[in-house]
């Protein structure tokens, strides 16, 4: 009797298990997604619409759109937004041009020189914190290697990260150093996948190298360029580590990015509601830009 | 297979729980000598009393973040937090800290004993010097003026007593230095660094951020302008790039012998007197902050121990704090490199006779003449706003007058005091 009940239970469990197998397989992934993405997102939206006091005994107050309206008059937010845009345009632009240029130059040779590829990839593999500390030491005005070279060449010493005219440039250079290899690798992969026939036909027709680049290489590379730019732009809009270590947002607020400002508001000023509002602004702007960019570049096709 | 997997999970979870649950007291401390000192003391306490003390060590700014987060969420993650003193109003006025009065009573004490320096105790009360104790002082930091006496003598100043003396010597030394040696160096980095190095000068000229009863912001005043004038003159004789300097760069400049003077914290004494890190062993002199139009005043920067309101083991935490701040333990702490907060240790002949403690008389004097950073729960925000304007003045993107005016407006906006 006991055996038959056990067997009956076993059979029904097996049937239930088979029926729900797909759900069960998906459950862990869904749980992770729910915990790490959906819950924080909902929490952030709620936080942005409330006023959270640092005092745990005070209740949260509904703030409506107040935190978002504050964005319109907050000078520091405007400074952060402007600096983030300047950084993104110049850093990503330079990385793209250098990456493409290097890929075109080295396309033929790099296949034979694998060690060169490895060396070029090294900066990209370093943690951003290590990159920032390295450049901080390079830029150090009194003991840094850059000023030592300037001194030996008889050139005027510079406060690379401390001069208002040079600070953003210095941050961009460090970022370009780290992320040009990423552009280079993507462009190289794109170039390697190009068909030979159109080039042979163009050569027979007498097209110059420039003409071939403009009319063949660039259009063929367009999807790769679009994806590379999209990834780098989204990353540049989140710039934090480099400025946090290299300049702390200074001098005179010249390198304060939106991510750095969000960090300050959330953790230094203990105002998570306003930090959530700025974060949502950044999130929606990035999503809107990416959607527009994907449509514009016809990546969906 | 399943049984083995479950066993592994249970084992891993119980190991995790064991490491946390067994801690009688959990402490959040900063990286660096202050945190290292308390970590060592905790190990001694564990051996002596059998209490397990767990230390969570984090970089300076993360200590504030983690403590604020624990306080705001009442997580009870930490029993004790080693706090920088300007954070006290934020933690105390937002109900993150335990009032220590009942614990003193239970121990049969009125409060901390009279061997503690009065200024060290004043900061541990909230409101300042009048309210109940919300912490106990542990590391007696106050800024001092560091200078190369031989170089200053060369420049015609025997021992600088005023900022005018400093300027005179610094100007002569920088002019002679040819862009490789400077008479003065300071922390000009935006935010906390530039504010920390400006405040003592600000006070030396009789200026302050608020009036006595905190009903008016008083940055943009003739006193503030006089302080700013000296600050800008000091900038002009400092190295290029001070706009991004923090304590490390300033300390290294003095240790390497590329700058003759600066304001800095006493923990740099150990570096200056260590031949493996300094070219200036025995050559740096220490003095209290020079005077302006008023007597000089150091910025106090004590590290203090407070019990979190949501702490799980408050009584054990208080017992540890009393033990760690006793004269015997404070002497051990001093030997480990942290300045004390007790008179008896500052004047202990067995310490002051040693070269590495020769700055103790000056440091005690500096603490006694120190001023706390403006006591306001929104100090981090105030410091940030003031630091931006000072950074702009140092970088030359706005005039000193504009910087004062805009600082005044920004602090009024943040505090709501008009």
Image (cartoon, coloured by chain):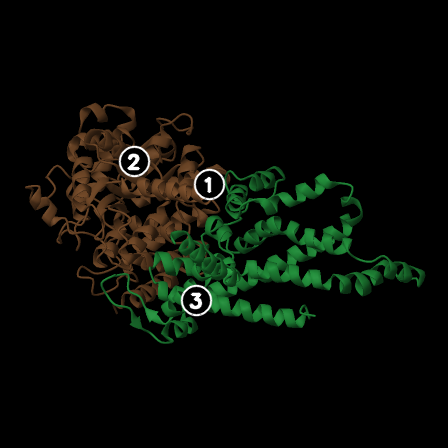
Crowdedness near tag 3: few (<14), some (14–19) or many (≥20) residues, C-alpha within 10 Å: many
Callouts 2 and 1 on one subunit: yes
Q: Residue at x 63, y 69 (%)?
A: A293
Q: Which label is found at residue B175?
A: 1
Specify the colour of chain B.
brown
- Chain under disc 2: B
Question: Secondary structure under badge 2?
Answer: helix
**Mark 2 or mark 1: which is in front?**
2
| Residue A138: % across, % down | 55, 42
Callouts 3 and 1 on one subunit: no
Q: Are marks 3 and 2 in contact (CB under 8 Å)?
A: no
Residue position marked by numbered label 3 in the rendering: A278
- Chain under disc 1: B
Callouts 3 and 2 on one subunit: no
Q: Which chain is green?
A: A
Name the quadrant containing residue A59: bottom left
Crowdedness near tag 2: few (<14), some (14–19) or many (≥20) residues, C-alpha within 10 Å: many
- Please indicate, yes or no, whether residue B335 appears anywhere in the rendered image: yes
């Amino acid at each position: 009797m006991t055996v038959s009940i056990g067997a009956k239970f076993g059979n029904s469990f097996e049937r239930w298990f088979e029926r729900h197998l797909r759900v069960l397989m998906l459950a862990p992934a869904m749980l992770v997604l729910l915990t790490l993405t959906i819950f924080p997102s909902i929490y952030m939206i709620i936080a942005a619409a409330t006023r959270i006091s640092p005092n745990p005994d005070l209740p949260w107050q509904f703030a409506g759109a107040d935190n978002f309206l504050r964005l319109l008059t907050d000078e520091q937010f405007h400074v952060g937004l402007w600096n983030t845009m300047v950084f993104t345009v110049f850093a990503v632009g330079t990385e793209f041009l250098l990456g493409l240029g290097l890929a075109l130059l080295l396309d033929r040779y790099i296949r034979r020189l694998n060690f060169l590829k490895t060396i070029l990839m090294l900066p990209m593999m370093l943690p951003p914190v290590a990159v920032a500390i390295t450049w901080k030491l390079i830029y150090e005005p009194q003991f840094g290697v850059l000023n030592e070279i300037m001194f030996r060449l008889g050139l005027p010493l510079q406060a690379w990260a401390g001069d208002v005219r040079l600070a953003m440039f210095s941050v961009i250079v460090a970022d370009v150093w780290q992320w040009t290899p990423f552009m280079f690798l993507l462009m190289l992969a794109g170039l390697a996948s190009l068909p030979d026939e159109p080039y042979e036909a163009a050569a027979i027709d007498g097209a110059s190298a420039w003409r071939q680049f403009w009319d063949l290489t660039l259009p063929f590379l367009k999807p790769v360029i679009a994806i590379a730019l999209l990834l780098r732009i989204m990353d540049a809009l989140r710039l934090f580590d480099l400025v946090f270590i290299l300049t702390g947002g200074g001098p005179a607020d010249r390198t304060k990015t939106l991510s750095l400002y969000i960090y300050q508001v959330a953790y230094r000023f203990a105002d998570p509601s306003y930090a959530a509002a700025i974060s949502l602004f950044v999130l929606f702007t990035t999503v809107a830009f990416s959607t527009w960019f994907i449509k514009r570049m016809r990546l969906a096709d | 297979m399943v049984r083995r997997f479950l066993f592994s999970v249970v084992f891993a979870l119980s190991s995790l729980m064991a490491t946390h649950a067994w801690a009688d007291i959990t402490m959040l401390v900063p990286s660096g000598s202050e945190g290292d000192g308390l970590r060592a003391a905790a190990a001694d306490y564990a051996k002596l009393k059998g209490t397990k003390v767990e230390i969570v060590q984090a970089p300076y700014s993360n200590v504030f973040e983690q403590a604020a987060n624990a306080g705001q969420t009442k997580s009870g993650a930490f029993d004790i937090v080693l706090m920088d003193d300007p954070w006290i109003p934020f933690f105390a006025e937002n109900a993150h800290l335990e009032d220590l009065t009942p614990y003193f009573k239970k121990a049969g004490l009125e409060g901390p004993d009279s061997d503690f320096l009065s200024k060290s105790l004043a900061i541990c009360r909230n409101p300042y010097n009048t309210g109940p104790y919300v912490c106990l002082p542990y590391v007696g930091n106050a800024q001092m003026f560091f200078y190369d006496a031989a170089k200053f003598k060369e420049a015609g100043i025997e021992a600088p007593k005023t900022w005018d003396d400093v300027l005179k010597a610094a100007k002569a030394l920088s002019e002679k230095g040819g862009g490789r040696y400077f008479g003065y160096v300071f922390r000009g980095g935006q935010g906390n660094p530039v504010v920390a190095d400006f405040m003592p000068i600000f006070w030396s000229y009789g200026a302050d951020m608020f009036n006595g009863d905190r009903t008016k912001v008083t940055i943009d005043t003739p006193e503030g302008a006089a302080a700013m004038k000296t600050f800008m003159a000091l900038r002009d004789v400092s190295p290029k790039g001070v706009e991004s300097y923090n304590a490390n760069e300033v300390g290294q400049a003095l240790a390497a012998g590329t700058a003759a003077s600066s304001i800095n914290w006493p923990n740099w004494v150990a570096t200056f007197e260590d031949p493996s890190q300094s070219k200036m062993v025995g050559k740096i002199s220490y003095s209290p902050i020079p005077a302006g139009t008023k007597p000089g005043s150091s910025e106090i920067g004590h590290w203090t121990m407070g019990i979190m309101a949501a702490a799980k083991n408050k009584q054990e935490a208080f017992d540890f704090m009393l033990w760690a701040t006793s004269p015997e333990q404070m002497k051990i702490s001093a030997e480990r490199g942290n300045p004390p907060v007790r008179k008896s240790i500052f004047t202990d002949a067995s310490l002051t006779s040693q070269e590495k403690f020769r700055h103790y008389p000056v440091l005690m004097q500096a603490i006694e003449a120190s001023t706390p950073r403006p006591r306001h729960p929104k100090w981090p925000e105030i410091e940030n706003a003031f630091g931006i304007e000072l950074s702009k003045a140092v970088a030359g993107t706005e005039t000193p007058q504009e910087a004062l005016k805009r600082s005044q407006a920004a602090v009024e906006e943040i505090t709501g005091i008009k």
